[in-house]
Structure formats: C-alpha cells, structure tokens
Amino acid sequence: MLVKVSIRRRNRRRPRSSQAGVTLLELILTCSILLILSTAALPIARFAAVREKEATLRHNLDEIRDAIDRYKDAADHNQIRVELGSEGYPPDLETLVNGVPLGSNIGTIGGSGSSDSGEKRIRFLRKIPIDPMTGQADWGLRAVQDDPDSRHWGGKNVFDVYSQSTGTALDGTKYADW
C-alpha cells in the first residue's frame, strides 16, 4: 500500500507557473485597454449631459411659449379681460402662474381683483420653469413692440421668452437665439 500512495503523489503535478495566473504582460495589456476605453467614454458622457440640458431648455421654452399662446387665445376669444395696449399678451410670467379671472365679473389683470371671492380663475402654468443653462427661473422677455432680436424688454407685455445664457449649443447656435 505504501507503494501505491507514493505513486499517486508523484503523478499529481503542480501547474506550471505560466498556467497558474496572469502574467505581468497580460495585466499591463488589460489595464491599457481599459484605460483607452474609459478615456473614450468620458467625452461621450459629457456630451450626453449637455444634450440632456439642451433638451430640457427646448422643452421649457416650448412650455412657456405654449402658455403665452393659450393666454393670447383666451384673450382673443374674450374669455379673459386684458389691459389696454397689451395686445392680448400677458403682462408678465407670474400672471401665467397666478392665473386670471374667468367670466363676466373679472377685473384687470394684476389689479385688485380678489382671488378668494369664489371666482373661477384660469392658470396657464403651474410654475415658471427653470432655465437649465443658468439654473434660475430668470428668462429674457420680449414684448410685441420690441425688435425680434432685442435683449431688452419693453415691459408692456410678454410676447416671447429666451434663455439669458451666453453659452453656445452643440450645434453652434447661441442658447439665447432659441
């Protein structure tokens, strides 16, 4: 029996050192490949974040412009009373959030009309969206009387909004021109 045990032990060979693990060369090559792949992925992730902000900016601009258009439609259909000289556009963005009275017992927008007297109000926005490029709800405004590319608001009404960011989009256009 002793002979059989010693033979079994001799037949068991330990794996060679080249088969036991990863060589230093393989480890260096693997790390190099991972480094190259990660440096290629970083700009893609950065562009994805910028694209997401740009999509949010476009959505927020569309949301505010849609609210302005709905206000104008309500004014044109005599559902709300508007101030003389406003051309049927809201006097400011807060009016879109606070709403205006509906019906025949309405006062002037932004006037002393009581909101707790039980009158129905129509609201066009839940809140003023935040400009993702500036991080604030501070939008540039244009009135009907302003030039189309004006950066100074006339103050009579809100015909259009734009971002106050001075940055440039991925397509080369200025955010303020959107």
Image (cartoon, grey):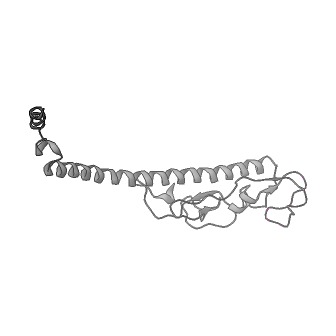
Residue occupying the point 64% across, 61% down = 143
Front-most of 24 and 147?
24
Residue occupying the point 48% across, 58% down = 175
The image quarter containing residue 110 is bottom right
Q: Which range is magenta?
A: 103-113
Q: Position of residue 49 (x, y in %)?
A: 44, 54
Q: Main secondary structure of the magenta part?
A: loop
Task: Left or right? Give the position of 27 relative to 91.
Answer: left
Q: Is residue 128 above or below residue 4?
A: below
Front-most of 160 and 132?
132
Q: Position of residue 117 (x, y in %)?
A: 91, 60
Q: How many marks?
A: 0
**Is residue 16 visible to us here?**
yes
Front-most of 49 and 141?
49
**Is residue 91 visible to us here?**
no
62 part of magenta stretch: no
Task: Left or right? Give the position of 79 relative to 25.
Answer: right
Q: Is residue 151 above or below residue 23?
A: below
Q: Is residue 49 above or below residue 1?
A: below
The image quarter containing residue 174 is bottom left
* Quadrant of the frame with the N terminus: top left
Task: Left or right? Give the position of 83 relative to 31.
Answer: right
Q: Position of residue 132 (x, y in %)?
A: 53, 59
104 part of magenta stretch: yes
Front-most of 158 and 45?
45
